[in-house]
């Protein structure tokens, strides 16, 4: 009987600890996710704008006409052909915003110990996300070829747009977390 009481006490303590963990980290994860989703919108504009204006070599002028990676990734994940052109459809936007939110939800957890301003912390985080995606899981799952095999121009477009995403994610997540703490 005594052991049953201790067992139920331990379970109650575990529940309280889980609740405390959620109470502490839940709002931070949510702030990161919201920041990443919102930052994904201007990121797409930067991606498209850079793709239009960056100079191309004569042999790679077709690079501008290739669909941008979010469109290629979405088509591959849904098992359909990539439609030519730059215009994104609803599934591409949903995937882009969702991936931005999902990855940025990790931002507060992974970058918290870094003694950097929010914008720089976000840019460092974005660089890691770019490398993990375009050098890591996307080629590993045969969704896209490695960035090593892509043109320097395409890599520049993607890295610069990720840096914009990271700067905005860091700024927005930092401001949101400060507001939650009651700071301005």
Image (spheres, rainbow, N blue to C red):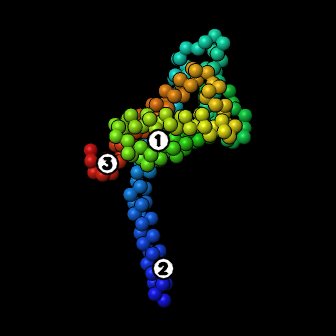
Query: As displayed, is residue 3 above or below residue 83?
Result: below
The CA distance from mark 3 to mark 1 is 17 Å
Label drawn at residue 151: none
Q: Are marks 2 and 1 in contact (CB under 8 Å)?
A: no
Q: Which residue is mark 1?
A: 36
| Residue positioned 43% across, 56% down in the render | 26
Residue 145, percent across and down? Answer: 67, 31
Q: Quick one: label 3, few (<14), some, or many (20+) residues within 10 Å?
A: few
| Mark 1, secondary structure of its residue | helix
Q: Which residue is mark 3?
A: 179
Above/below status of 12 relative to 182: below
Q: Nearer the N terminus, badge 3 or badge 2?
A: 2
Q: Looking at this rendering, what residue extends furthest in the bottom direction?
A: 1
User: Residue 7, labelled with which disc?
Assistant: 2
Instruction: Left or right? Give the position of 154 relative to 11.
Output: right
Which mark is first along the chain, 1 or 2? 2
Q: Position of residue 45 (x, y in %)?
A: 50, 29
Query: Tags 3 and 1 in contact by the CB under 8 Å rule?
Result: no
Depth check, mark 2 against mark 1: the one in front is 2
In this rendering, would 82 be left or right of 161? right
Residue 8 x, y percent position in the rendering:
47, 79
């Amino acid at each position: 009987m005594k052991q049953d009481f201790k067992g139920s006490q331990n379970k109650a303590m575990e529940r309280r600890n889980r609740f405390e963990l959620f109470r502490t980290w839940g709002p931070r994860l949510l702030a990161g996710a919201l920041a990443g989703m919102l930052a994904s919108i201007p990121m797409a504009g930067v991606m498209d704008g850079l793709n239009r204006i960056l100079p191309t070599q004569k042999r790679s002028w077709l690079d501008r006409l290739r669909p941008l990676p979010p469109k290629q990734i979405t088509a591959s994940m849904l098992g359909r052909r990539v439609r030519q052109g730059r215009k994104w459809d609803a599934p591409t936007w949903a995937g882009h915003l969702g991936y931005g939110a999902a990855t940025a939800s990790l931002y507060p957890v992974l970058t918290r110990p870094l003694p950097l301003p929010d914008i720089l912390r976000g840019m460092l985080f974005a660089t890691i996300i770019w490398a993990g995606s375009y050098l890591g899981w996307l080629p590993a799952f045969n969704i896209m070829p490695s960035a090593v095999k892509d043109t320097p121009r395409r890599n520049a477009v993607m890295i610069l747009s990720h840096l914009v995403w990271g700067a905005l994610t860091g700024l927005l997540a930092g401001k949101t977390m400060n507001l939650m703490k009651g700071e301005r």
